Amino acid sequence: MINVVTKTILYSMSDILDKLNILKENLKALDNQYQSTNLENQLLKNQQGQLVAEKAALIKKNETAKSHLKSLLERIENIKDYGKE
């Protein structure tokens, strides 16, 4: 009777150890996925920051170009009006 109980306990311990090893492997895989996702997230944040800065620079250039164009159009209008007086 003791042999049967001992075998059952050993089987249960072996089963528990197998499950713990599987859990350990799953945790390692999960940690690897977390690290990968974390790195990807950081890269995307950096890229987003660069894109925001680039957009701001383009908006500034666009406003400068609009201002120059408006100035040129006003000068053209002044030249047209100058000959009429």
Image: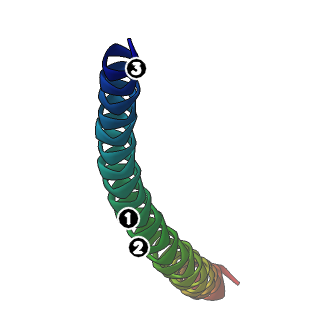
For the residues labelled 2 and 1, the Cα–Cα distance comes to: 5 Å
Q: CA distance from mark 1 to mark 3?
A: 56 Å
Graded by Cα atoms within 10 Å as few (under 14), some (14 to 19) or many (20 or more), the crowding at tag 3 reads few
The colouring scheme, among rainbow, by chain, secondary structure or one colour, is rainbow
Numbered label attached to residue 43: 2
Mark 1 highlights which residue? Answer: 40
Residue 2's mark? 3
Provide residue 28's location: percent of width, then percent of height: 35, 57
Q: In front of the other: label 3 or label 2?
A: 3
Camera-side residue: 74 or 19?
19
Assess disc 1: are there few (<14), some (14-19) or many (≥20) residues with their C-alpha within 10 Å of its C-alpha: few
| Identity of the residue furthest to the front in this view | 1
Q: Residue at x 28, y 38 (%)?
A: 18
Identify the amino acid type marked 2. Answer: Leu
Up the image or down, 80 lies above or below 3; here it is below
Residue 78: give its label: none
Q: Quick check: 74 left or right of 42?
A: right
Circle 1: element type: helix
Q: Are marks 1 and 3 in contact (CB under 8 Å)?
A: no
Marks 2,1: beta carbons within 8 A: yes
**Tag in front: 1 or 3:** 3
Name the outermost residue toward the right.
Answer: 85
3 vs 18: above or below: above
The quadrant of the image that shows the C terminus is: bottom right
- Identify residue type, mark 1: Glu
Residue 83 drawn at (x, y percent): 58, 86
Say whether residue 37 is left or right of residue 14. Answer: right
